[in-house]
């Protein structure tokens, strides 16, 4: 959940924060993506202790709050947007910091866990390498970097436009960006894969036919449909938790260790 800047310089549409804050607890996509991410992390984190973590681009801070309160991880939530941090403070998130991913206000090697969740797609293409270098800079040797990003240009949508998404990633390009910054990639997989055919039909066929203006894709659906969609992601969580990967998907996740 990224921070917000002006449209020309990178960052998320500030208007999206209210949508995220309203629905991220219960909306199927958020619940399912969290299940997938934890399924990937748990086997690795079982052998580690988080002494100090960072979520760079925390948005409303809800995910940092989960890590702090449910996992007991001392995570610092950082975002460039005062709007996002307003929600974080209101829900009692600890230690929120306003700062820019391009120049993180921390010394080298400060953290043993750094997360960047859906932030890089909001940067202009090419700027992601400098951002990953900065994430790696504040990571201690042996520390873990976790990055999730929107995948595959052919899946750009009305929501992508509304949210000020500027680029999407392949698994190879994201893994290479981490490797160039001295991060040894341990896991890299696509996610939100089972619904890929549905997304492709919606974004490449249905939306072009309707020709509607850009709009947020975060909106409630009937409870039965929410359950069906979440179940698809829960199945993916079980799959990746067993050490398997997906060859395609709507998101890509890379987890690496600083050399």
Image (tube, helix red, strand yellow):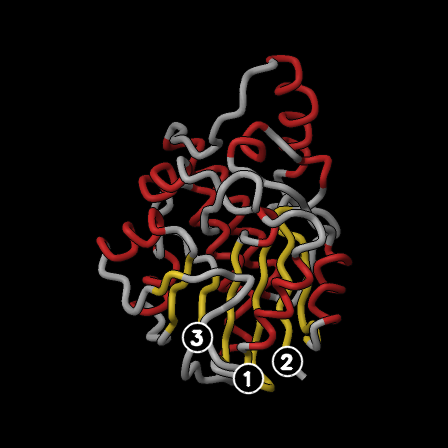
In the structure shown, which secondary structural element does the residue marked by tag 2 occupy? strand
Between 226 and 41, the one nearer to me in the picture: 41
Q: If you read the primary sequence from the N terminus, does the residue marked by circle 2 or circle 1 appear first?
A: 1
| Circle 1 Cα neighbour tier, 10 Å, few/some/many (<14 / 14–19 / ≥20) | some
Q: Which residue is under mark 2? A: 258
Distance (Cα) linking label 3 and label 2: 14 Å
Q: Position of residue 166 (x, y in %)?
A: 63, 41
Between 85 and 245, the one nearer to me in the picture: 85
Q: Position of residue 164 (x, y in %)?
A: 55, 38
Name the image quarter holding the C terminus: bottom right
Distance (Cα) linking label 2 and label 1: 7 Å
Would residue 166 be found to the left or right of residue 51 on screen?
right
Q: Considering only vertical position in the picture, is 109 above or below 23?
A: below
The answer to whether any part of residue 70 appears in the image is: yes
Would residue 102 be found to the left or right of residue 151 on screen?
left
Between 96 and 52, the one nearer to me in the picture: 96
The answer to whether any part of residue 46 appears in the image is: no
Q: Where is residue 242 in the image (x, y as percent from the top left)?
A: 61, 66
Task: Please report the residue visible at 67 percent of the width from the left and 44 percent of the height from the top.
Answer: 167
| Circle 3 Cα neighbour tier, 10 Å, few/some/many (<14 / 14–19 / ≥20) | many
Q: Which residue is under mark 1? A: 140
Q: Which dot marks residue 53?
A: 3
């Amino acid at each position: 959940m990224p921070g917000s800047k002006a449209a020309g310089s990178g960052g998320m549409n500030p208007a999206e924060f209210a949508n995220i804050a309203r629905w991220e607890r219960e909306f199927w996509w958020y619940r399912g993506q969290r299940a997938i991410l934890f399924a990937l992390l748990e086997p690795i984190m079982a052998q580690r202790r988080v002494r100090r973590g960072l979520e760079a681009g925390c948005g409303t801070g809800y995910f940092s709050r989960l890590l702090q309160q449910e996992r007991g991880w001392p995570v610092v939530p950082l975002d460039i947007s005062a709007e996002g941090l307003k929600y974080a403070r209101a829900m009692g998130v600890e230690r929120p910091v306003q700062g820019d991913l391009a120049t993180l206000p921390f010394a080298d090697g400060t953290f043993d866990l750094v997360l960047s969740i859906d932030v890089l797609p909001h940067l202009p293409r090419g700027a992601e390498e400098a951002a990953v270098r900065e994430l790696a800079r504040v990571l201690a040797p042996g520390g873990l970097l976790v990055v999730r990003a929107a995948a595959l240009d052919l899946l750009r949508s009305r929501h992508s436009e509304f949210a000020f998404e500027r680029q999407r990633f392949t698994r190879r390009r994201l893994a290479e960006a981490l490797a160039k910054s001295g991060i040894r990639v341990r896991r890299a997989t696509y996610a939100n894969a089972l619904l890929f055919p549905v997304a492709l039909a919606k974004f490449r066929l249905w939306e072009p036919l309707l020709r509607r203006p850009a709009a947020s894709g975060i909106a409630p659906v009937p409870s039965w449909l929410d359950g069906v969609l979440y179940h698809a992601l829960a199945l993916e969580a079980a799959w990746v938790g067993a050490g398997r990967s997906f060859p395609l998907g709507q998101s890509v996740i890379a987890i690496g260790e600083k050399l």
